[in-house]
Amino acid sequence: MSFLVLDADTAESIHLIKLLADTGSQVVGVAELEAATTYFERNDVKAVLSPELTSCAAVAARQPHIPVLYFSEQPVDAKQLHECLSAGVAECLELPLPAQEVMAKLQACIDRNQAKAKTAQNYWHAAHDALEVDLQAGRYIQTSLLPPTPQHFEHISLEHRLEPSLLLSGDFTDYFGLADGLSACYLADVSGHGSSAAFVTVLLKHFSAQLARLADAGERLRPGEVLTWMNNQLMALDIDKHVAMFFACVDSTAGTLTYANAGQFPPAFLAVGDNVSMLEQKAKPLGLFPDVQYRCVETPFPPGARLGVFTDGVLDLVAGETLLEKEELLADIVKSAEDMAGIWSQLDLDQLGQDDVSCLRVANDA
């Protein structure tokens, strides 16, 4: 076994080094803490011994996985023992002691330390496994909140795909039918990743249910007013999260798309025939500022029209050196793809995992 004796220039240290070496152990003596740190990095040290309490405390703080023993040729009184325990010392040796007894105490310290490390490792693995189960359950719940894909409201088809960077996602989408040939849809990107962002998506689903009830009661949903209402709700909750969102209502009878944007980027892409336009709007994300009014825009959505909305993670999945080049590629993808699978097949899926990536596709199939 390999031992390190710190502050090895004292007479008692020299005596202890010789005693340990005579047992066949590998013993190295160093005078300063910096030299000990270098030795730790290059060697498998089983225990450290020092006659200086300050050195013991420094090693115990820097190398908590290695037992530290304090030794002295003077009796250790109750005050010193308390100081040793407070410093993280595993054992106090009152020298002189027979070599056999010193080795027994060293082995006992090593065994205790290894048992403690094993217990900590088992606890960590159990906690990790429990967290994994919780996250998987959370992922199942979050996935169950998503609407069917694809789904049709008269001749309007809607489909989505969400790919989280972690088990839980901060991206969310929903769509639902309204009266008189109308349907509503949105794509949202909650700030951050993981569980904290995923909790907000549950709140968004609750907002969807409230909006659907309002529509059932005869209220006409106007995207700008909807975003203003959602912003006020988030501001009132004060949850320290903001949400970028594109919200739209499709009128299958009139062949129109009415939309509003709350900081969603990149802009939505609308393909009509061979033309693709970006539905750009400058507006703040939800949940950042009070009393924000969002502007509503109506545009034709005739038979054959396709709408593609992405969260910003998609920018990692398309080629191009500049943002303009990436937007042009996304526009071509929305124009050429016949369905969500067609969109996804044109993305660089090897880059998945850097950020949540989501897409909402709406088409007028009349």
Image: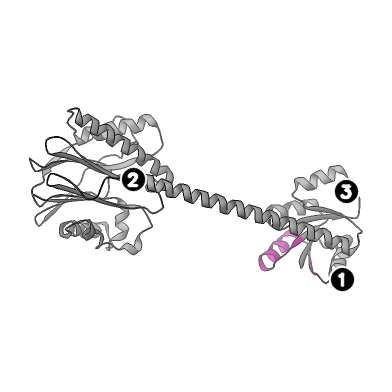
- Please name whichever residue, 292 or 186, is drawn nearer the observer in this view of the structure: 186
Left or right of residue 138: residue 171: left
From the top left corner, tell me how far across and down residue 129 is, in percent.
52, 52
Residue at mark 1 to residue at mark 2: CA–CA distance: 69 Å
Say the numbered circle drawn on residue 76. 3
Q: Which badge, 3 or 1, is on the more N-terminal residue?
A: 1
Residue 336 visible somewhere in the drawing: yes
Q: Disc 1 marks which residue?
A: 22
Q: Nearer the viewer, mark 1 or mark 2?
A: 2
Q: Nearer the viewer, mark 2 or mark 3?
A: 2
Q: Compared with residue 131, is residue 106 higher up or lower down, i.e. above or below?
A: below
Q: Disc 2 marks which residue?
A: 144
What's drawn in magenta, residue-wise? 23-47
- Check whether the beta carbons of the residues at disc 2 and disc 3 lie within 8 A of each other: no
Residue 360 visible somewhere in the drawing: no
Q: Tell me the kind of residue under disc 1.
A: Asp
- Please name whichever residue, 350 or 87, is drawn nearer the observer in this view of the structure: 350
* Residue 45, magenta (yes or no): yes
Q: Tell me the kind of residue under disc 2.
A: Ser
- Residue name at image x 27 percent, y 36 percent: 208
Q: Tell me the kind of residue under disc 3.
A: Val
From the top left corner, tell me how far across and down residue 153 is, in percent.
16, 43
Q: How crowded is mark 1: few (under 14 residues within 10 Å), some or many (20 or more)?
A: few
Q: What element carries label 2?
A: helix
Q: Which badge, 2 or 3, is on the more N-terminal residue?
A: 3
- Residue name at image x 15 percent, y 34 percent: 179
Residue at mark 2 to residue at mark 3: CA–CA distance: 65 Å
Q: Is mark 3 on a helix, strand or loop?
A: loop
